[in-house]
Amino acid sequence: MRLNRFAFLATLFSILWLGASFSWADDDIETYGAPESHDYIQHRTYIGIFGTSADIDSNNDFNGYETLTSGGYSNIEQDFVPTINRNFGFGGMVGHREGPWAAELSYWYSNHTGTIYATDESGNPTTVITTATYTTINLDLKRYFLTTIPTQPFIDLGMNFAFLSSHNTSNLWGYDPNTQQFDYFLGAGDQTDSGLGMNLGLGMEIYLGNGFSLIGEVIQRYTTCAGSSGAGKIDLTPTPLNDPNNLTGSLEGNGLNFCVGATVGIDQ
C-alpha cells in the first residue's frame, strides 16, 4: 500500500496521543503518589554509532524492471531503477531525552549489489549487475517505557529522507539524423532516486552506567520516491508518460531495517 498523506498524519497523531496519555499518567503518579520522579533517566544528550542491516523491498517498484525515460528535443535520458540486496552498513546519531521522550537525528549508510532486468539491442532479456549506495537521514521521536529500570523498550515514529545512488544505470541518447531517432548513445552515468517517508520502529535500550548504553531497533520504512536524476541531470518523475508501468506518479521504496549500536551521554 502506497504512502498516503492522510494515513501518515492519522498515524502520527494517534501515536503521539497514545504516548502523551502514558506521559500524563506518569505525571499523575508523580504528583499524587510520590514527591518526585523515579525515572532512571531524567534528561540526557547523547551521541552514538551503530551497525545496520538495510534493504528496499523488491516486491514493490524497486524490483529491477522500472525504467524512467525523458522526452526531449536534444537528448533523452533513460534511468533504470535497480533492485538491491540486503546488506550491512553503519550510521551515527545525536539526540536529546527528557523523561520518557527523546528526539533524535540519525544517518544510515550502506553499499549494495544492484540488479536490473532489461533487454538488449536485439530485444533479448538481459540481467545487469551494478553497485548501489543507500543512505537515509532520519528525524525520529521516541517514547520510552519501564523508565524506572535500566532496560527500557521504546516506540519510534519519525520521517526519513532516502537516497539510492546506483552506478552506470542511466543512459543518455542523442538524436541521429540518419535514423531520425534518439538512438545515438552518448554515454552512461550514475543516477540517484530520492524520496521521503515515515519511520515506524520498536526497540530496546539498556543503560550500563557511566553514560553508556546499548541500543537495538527494528524499523519499518515507508518511503515514496518522487523521481530520479541521472546522466543528463534531468529530474524524472515516474508518470505514465515516461514510465508506462507506473500509474501513480511515484516509486514505492518501503523496507524493513535493523540497527544495533551504542550511545554515550555528553550531558546528563
Image (cartoon, rainbow, N blue to C red):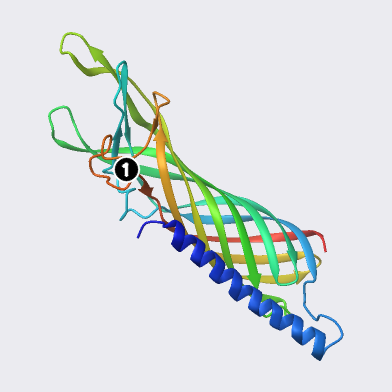
Q: Is residue 203 visible?
A: no
Judge by depth and name the residue closer to the eye, 122 or 201: 201
**Crowd class of label 1 (few under 14; some 14 to 19; many from 20; radius 10 Å):** many
Quadrant location of the N terminus in the rendered image = bottom left
Against 149, is 254 above or below?
above
Residue in the image at 63% along x and 62% along y: 141
Residue in the image at 66% along x and 57% along y: 104
Quadrant location of the C terminus in the rendered image = bottom right
Q: Say left or right for 46 vs 125.
A: right
Against 109, is 100 above or below?
below
Residue 203 at what x, y percent from top left? 58, 69
Judge by depth and name the residue closer to the eye, 18 or 155: 18
Q: Is residue 99 visible?
A: yes
Residue in the image at 53% along x and 52% along y: 160
Q: Which residue is mark 1?
A: 115
Judge by depth and name the residue closer to the eye, 239 or 51: 239
Location of residue 34 (image quadrant): bottom right
Residue in the image at 64% along x and 78% along y: 21
Q: Secondary structure at mark 1?
A: strand
Q: Say left or right for 185 vs 221.
A: left
Residue 94 at what x, y percent from top left? 70, 53
